[in-house]
Image (cartoon, rainbow, N blue to C red):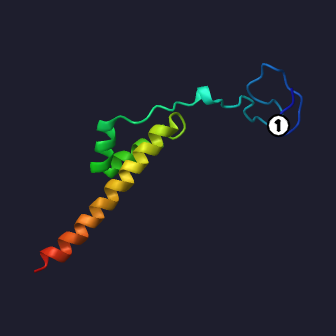
Amino acid sequence: MFCEKCGKEVNDEAIVCVGCGCSLKSTTESDVNKEPLSGGVKFLSFCFPIVGGILYFVHQNSAPQKSKDACSAALWGFGVGILLNILAAVGGGM
């Protein structure tokens, strides 16, 4: 087998190229966790967007679907919070 990055011949069972050090193991669909984020954690991420941001970075590589769900909930929560603040400022000023 040959390294895709540097072209050096490597052992078929090798995980890392001895020439350039890049990973030889390709990520397959079965290696990636596609489990969605639970409803309670989505709600928590919506109410406290900082939690969603943290969960986004925690699950970014290991569980991309959870990462995407946490980010989406955090962004929606942040947007709704800004909207509520604008409405309170406009309506509460009278």
* Residue that sits furthest to the left in the current view: 94
Which residue ends up furthest to the top in the rendered image? 13
Q: Is residue 17 left or right of residue 87?
A: right
Q: Please state the horizontal and vertical placement of residue 66, each as a whole percent of the image.
A: 45, 38
Instruction: Return the x and y of residue 68 as percentages of the image width and height.
Output: 47, 45
**Callout 1 secondary element:** loop
What amino acid does circle 1 point to?
Glu
Residue 18 occupies quadrant: top right
Q: Is residue 84 above or below residue 90?
A: above
- Residue at image location 13% in from the left, 79% down from the top: 93
Q: Which residue is mark 1?
A: 4
Q: Position of residue 44 (x, y in %)?
A: 29, 43
Q: Residue at x 33, y 58 (%)?
A: 78
Q: Residue furthest bottom?
A: 94
- Looking at the image, which is closer to me, 9 or 64? 64
Q: Which residue lies at the image location 73% right of the left edge and 25% below the top edge?
A: 15
Which quadrant holds residue 40? top left
User: Residue 53 at x, y = what percent?
Assistant: 40, 48
